[in-house]
Image (cartoon, rainbow, N blue to C red):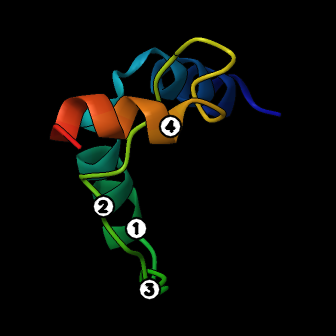
Amino acid sequence: MSAMREELHYLVDQLPESELRPALELIRGRLDEPAPAERDLPFFASFEAEPDLAERHEEILRSEMGR
């Protein structure tokens, strides 16, 4: 791999997640390839929780919803 490609890979790895889309669009714009169909799911996120969260979901929902 050339030094320029290695530097590009390094720099991309340093970008925060929020800056990846504009960088990706810039690079795609330099190519003659259409962007693949992509779904933007801003509501989707992951989080850390107690190991038994899934097992206790009904109990948690009842207490939060006042059931």
Amino acid type shown at disc 3: Ala
Whether residue 2 sits left or right of residue 53 in the image: it is right
Q: Amino acid at mark 2?
A: Glu
- Where does residue 59 sit, x and y in percent of width and height? 45, 32
Measure the alpha-carbon separation of dots 1 and 3: 13 Å
Q: Which residue is mark 2?
A: 25
Going by the numbered disc 1, the residue's amino acid type is Arg
Quarter containing the C terminus = top left
- Residue 28: numbered disc: 1
Residue under numbered circle 3: 37
User: Which label sits on residue 57?
Assistant: 4
Question: In the rendered view, does 25 fall on the left or right side of 7?
Answer: left
**Whether label 1 touches label 4, CB < 8 Å:** no
Q: Amino acid at mark 4?
A: His
| N-term mark: 1 or 3 | 1
Query: Which mark sits nearer the N-terminus, 3 or 4?
Result: 3
Q: Position of residue 32 (x, y in %)?
A: 45, 86
